[in-house]
Image (tube, helix red, strand yellow):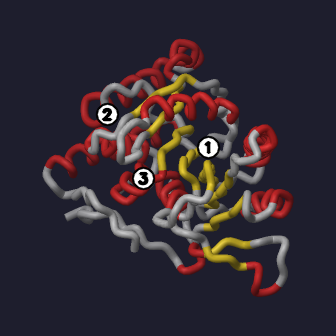
């Protein structure tokens, strides 16, 4: 009674277009492609951003420096970065469009959402307009070191061996846990441990860090998983991995470098409680059949 069997995958009319800042007049508006189209890029980077006008430039500078060097070294490599402005109230779109103007709209595109959907909702809509064979989502705060993508890519080659071309590789901060515990209060450590136990007990086993915002999926896996994703807030990673294990999609996990960045949108206590509730509901709703799984998502 409190949820729909299948997730809502629609979008506003304005969310079907992006702006080419180097053009004038009506020609500035260009229509996004669909994830159901044939891939035309090696890599798509989806960056969910909510009120990130201050932190976004650091992340974008690092990511684009790595991607440009990668392309210089291997001209056959091509990429795109899609910044998804998740209903921000600041100048996130304007900041992102400066990169689109500098690098060209073929490399940097900005998807501005009509209203805030949550990180999971922003990542989903970014995935649905991506052109890459591999689709990476990365946090806008720059907490992860972007050049560590090469580690995820190496692991992707190892795990992506099935004929269906589906695989997921997660960046992991689990190796930094002892250090982070030393810097946290006893209460926050208790909440973190409790959250990890809930994830392990109810939804996902075998993955040490489900919440690191640095994950790459093959195009085929992204279509299947994000077409079935119900959770649009912080716990969307857990449902995504729950679904991946349901479908027996190979999952890899790689240790990456990570640093705490000021300005987190998570509220220490409330966000953990909200995520715990979402995880419990994920398990219950799938268990009782309130949420259904579509094994063959339609292109519409």
- The residue shown at (37%, 60%) is 227
User: Residue 189: where, in percent of width, then height?
Assistant: 46, 21
User: Circle 3 sits in a helix, a strand or a loop, which is it?
Assistant: helix
Q: Is residue 293 shown left or right of residue 65?
A: left
Number of the label disc, if any, that sits on residue 220:
3
- The N terminus: image quadrant: bottom left
- The residue shown at (81%, 86%) is 25
Q: Is residue 219 shown left or right of residue 180?
A: left
Camera-side residue of 285 and 98 = 98
97 vs 271: above or below? below
Q: Total marks drawn?
A: 3
Work out whether residue 14 can be spotted: yes
Q: Is residue 266 shown left or right of residue 187?
A: right
Camera-side residue of 164 and 118 = 164
User: Circle 1 sits in a helix, a strand or a loop, which is it?
Assistant: loop
Which residue ends up furthest to the left in the rendered image? 288
288 vs 214: above or below? below
Pointer 3 local density, CA inside 10 Å: few below 14, some 14–19, many at least 20: some
Read off the residue under disc 2.
204
User: Circle 2 sits in a helix, a strand or a loop, which is it?
Assistant: loop
Q: Is residue 66 shown left or right of residue 291?
A: right
Viewer-side label of 1, 3: 3
User: Residue 233: where, in percent of width, then height?
Assistant: 45, 51
Read off the residue under disc 1.
139
Q: Earlier in the sequence, mark 1 or mark 3?
A: 1
């Amino acid at each position: 009674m409190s949820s729909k069997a299948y997730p809502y995958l629609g979008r506003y009319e304005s969310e079907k277009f992006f702006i080419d800042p180097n053009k004038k007049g009506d020609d500035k508006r260009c229509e996004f492609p669909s994830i159901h189209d044939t891939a035309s890029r090696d890599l798509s980077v989806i960056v969910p951003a909510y009120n990130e006008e201050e932190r976004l430039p650091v992340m974008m500078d690092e990511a684009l420096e790595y991607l440009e060097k990668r392309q210089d070294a291997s001209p056959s490599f091509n990429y795109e970065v899609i910044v998804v402005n998740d209903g921000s109230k600041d100048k996130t779109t304007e900041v992102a469009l400066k990169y689109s103007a500098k690098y060209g709209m073929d490399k940097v595109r900005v998807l501005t959402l009509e209203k805030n959907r949550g990180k999971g909702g922003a990542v989903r809509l970014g995935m649905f307009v991506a052109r890459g064979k591999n689709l990476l989502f990365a946090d806008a705060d720059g907490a992860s070191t972007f050049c560590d993508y090469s580690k995820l890519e190496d692991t992707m080659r190892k795990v992506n061996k099935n004929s269906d071309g589906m695989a997921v590789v997660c960046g992991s901060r689990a190796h930094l846990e002892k250090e982070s515990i030393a810097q946290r209060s006893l209460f926050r450590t208790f909440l973190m441990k409790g959250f990890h136990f809930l994830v392990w007990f109810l939804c996902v086993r075998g993955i040490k860090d489900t919440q690191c915002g640095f994950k790459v999926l093959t195009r085929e896996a992204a279509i299947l998983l994000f077409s079935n994703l119900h959770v649009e807030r912080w716990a969307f990673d857990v449902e995504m991995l729950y679904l991946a294990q349901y479908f027996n999609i190979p999952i890899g996990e790689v240790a990456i470098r990570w640093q705490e960045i000021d300005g987190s949108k998570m509220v220490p206590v409330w966000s953990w409680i909200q995520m715990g509730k979402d995880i419990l509901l994920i398990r219950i709703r799938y268990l009782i059949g309130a949420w259904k799984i579509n094994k063959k998502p339609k292109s519409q």
